[in-house]
Structures are given as C-alpha cells and as structure tokens.
Image (cartoon, rainbow, N blue to C red):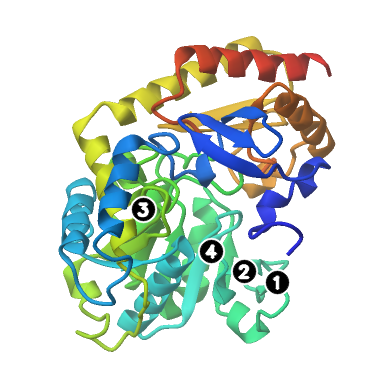
Amino acid sequence: MGGVNSPVRSFSYVGDIPRFIEYATGPYLVTVDGDRLIDYVLSWGPMILGHAHPDVVAAIQAAATKGTSFGAPHHAETQLACLIQSFFPSMEKIRFVNSGTEACMSAIRLARGVTGRKRLLKFSGCYHGHVDALLVSAGSGLATQSTPDSAGVLPEWAAWTSVLPFNDVSALAQALDAWGHELAGVIVEPVMGNMGLILPQPGFLRALREACDRVGALLIFDEVMTGFRVALGGAQSVYGVVPDLTCLGKVVGGGLPCAAYGGRAVIMDHVAPLGGVYQAGTLSGNPLAMAAGLATLSLLKDTPAFEQAQQATQRLVTGLSTRLDGFPVHVTSLGSMWSIFMCEGPVQNADDAMRVDRDRFATWYRRVLSQGVYLAPSPFESQFVSSVHTEALIDETVAAIVAACDEW
C-alpha cells in the first residue's frame, strides 16, 4: 500500500519517493538504479554487523537445509534464550515471538493478567508497536482521557492508557496519586529511539522503578531498539535499573523476524501453558530466525564487533558536533545509535523534538542522499552504525552532512 509495507519508508516527510533496493552488503545498500548508498538505517537497527554478514548467512543456509519451520520445540530456541540471558540476566524466562509489536503487546497483557488491573502508563513519543492500546494521544490534562491516535482503535481501549511526558518525574508523581491503585504497568523505551535518540535524565528511570514498586505495578522496558545497541546488555545495564519485563527485537533476530519478551520467573510463569495469560504464534521460535540470532549474538559476544560499531559512532558524532558548532542542530548518541535534530538543544522529550524544522530537514535530507548517504527519511527516527562502517566511510559521511548544512 502506497508502495511500502511500513509508513516510515514512504519518504513523505522529505518530499521524495522511496528507494527500492536490489541488494545490500556490509555498510551499503544498492538500489535498483545502481546507486550505492552508505546505510545508517540498517533495516531500522538489526544489522549491527552490516548486511549479509557471511557467518550469519551461512547459519541461515545451514538451518534451512534442516527445515524452515517445525511448529515444535528445537534446540536452537534454548541456545538463543540462554545466550540472551547472558546479556540480560533480568530475563529469567523468555518467550520468543515474531516482532517487537508482539513482544510489547504480550508483555502488557501479562502485566494486566498478573496484577488484575487495567491501566497502563506510557510516555509521549515512545513507540511500542501498532498495538491498539498504545496508539493513543494524551488528553488536554493529566487526568483526562486519552484518545485514539489511529482509526480503528476503540476509545474504550485508549481510555485505559495514560500518557506522560518523558523525563518528567513530577508528572509521574501526579499520575501515581491519580491512578496508582489501578495501574497494571509502566512501559517505556528507557532510551527513546522513536522520536530521534533522547536520553533519560539522571534519576528518571530510577523514579519509574520506585514508583512501580510503591503501587505494585510492573515496570516494562521496551528494549526492542536499544537491546544490543546502546550496550550489549541494553539500557538497563547502562543505567543500573532492572525492569520486571524486557522486550527485545531487531538485533536479537540478526535481521530475520524475531523478538522476545521475558522477566522474572514468578511473572513469566503466568504465561500459558503454565499460567492463564494466553499468547501463541505459529512461527515463533522459527529455526531460521533462531540461527540468525545465534550467529549475530555469538559474534557480538566473542568478537570486538560491538566496540567497533560504538567507536565508529563516536567518531561520527564527534566529527558532526565539532564541524556543526554554531548551526541550529543538536546531535545525540549512545552506543551505536545517534540522531541529529534540526533544532537547538537540549532535546529531553517529544515536545522538544517537535521543535525541529521539518522543511529544513527535508531539504537537508535530499542533499545528504544525493551525496550517497542513506539516513532515516524522518526527523523523528534514530540512525544506526554497524561494525563494518570504516573510518573512511564515517569521515565521508561527516563531510556529506556538513556540506548539506553549509548550503543553508
């Protein structure tokens, strides 16, 4: 529909048409027109080792010779779960699903099933998939009803999701006073990636943990984007705050459809068949996805790939921050994620991010793309770096971005 399978691919924000890809290799995309682009979208995050990494491709090929789907348990599921637990010890038990949307949807259902409560708290600008209960906008005041953000979402579903500003501890305190007794869970991107990269302010995540403990709600970290990106152990390892449930996706499947949710065993034991919270999926734990995930996470654990991606990101951000000093832009980064906002900083929440100059972004984006650098075609998305982005490619990228700004 509209030439794309996900709206953000449409290039509508930048007044252009989407590039159709013939193939991808390493840090590059090659279009059907033969243009080679330095890729910082990286399939929206999963390709931390670059495209078509030979070890990952070989693992997928080997798995395919044994069958592409079983609908039954197999050893690779257990292997990948154990490997994930080595990075995320808070995930004592894990259930595989096929997308980040499924992982978040399932974690929310689990929080409601465990607590017997209805209300969910989320934060403006944090995206947790196209789940009905999460496609909502806040009302005009803290205690007013939320309203559907999409046609087809029932108002009665939206009414049970409350939306607060990210990084606002005082709003959190007011929310607890109003709704603490009916709160099932709090879901958050611990580092925001879906309004551009926005970092939590000191003490914010800790305040969420303490708030959930105080009212008996579950804290859910949506690390679909940040898992294995901001750190190998995700944002929870960076900030030292342990959630009750964690949602993973993107990198965890090595580029194939795969996601997972998990947490403390006493909570996960409520999921069927052990408990009464139902969740199922025919292709969950697919052997090809498990093989790709195993190969990717094994390389991240046993090689300096993550450090290489992180160092490349730091070189990029340092170059941009130095050469764009004085321009009305704000650059952020953590691990192998980064963003450039077309406004002056700081950017601490969705309202700050909405200050970006969208027209300027569109013009700038087209100029950067014409120089062979492929970024997310939206001012509200994070960019990603892989372990195979070389220093020469990083410097070429900095030059292209700065040149596009110079033309202002």
The reply to whether the C-beta atoms of the residues labelled 3 and 2 are less than 8 Å apart is no
Between residue 213 and residue 289, name the one nearer to us: 289
Judged by depth in the image, the label closer to the viewer, 3 or 1, is 3
Instruction: Tell me the distance, in whole angstroms, between the alpha carbons under discs 3 and 1.
Output: 29 Å
Dot 4 corresponds to which residue? 129
- Which residue lies at the image location 69% right of the left edge and 57% below the top edge? 4
Dot 2 corresponds to which residue? 135
Dot 3 corresponds to which residue? 253
Q: Is residue 234 left or right of residue 176?
A: left
Residue 268: x, y in percent?
Answer: 24, 73
- Amino acid at circle 3: Gly
Q: In which quadrant of the rendered view does residue 235 lie?
A: top left
Residue 348: x, y in percent?
Answer: 58, 40
Between residue 82 and residue 68, name the one nearer to us: 68
Residue 394: x, y in percent?
Answer: 52, 17
- Amino acid at circle 4: Gly
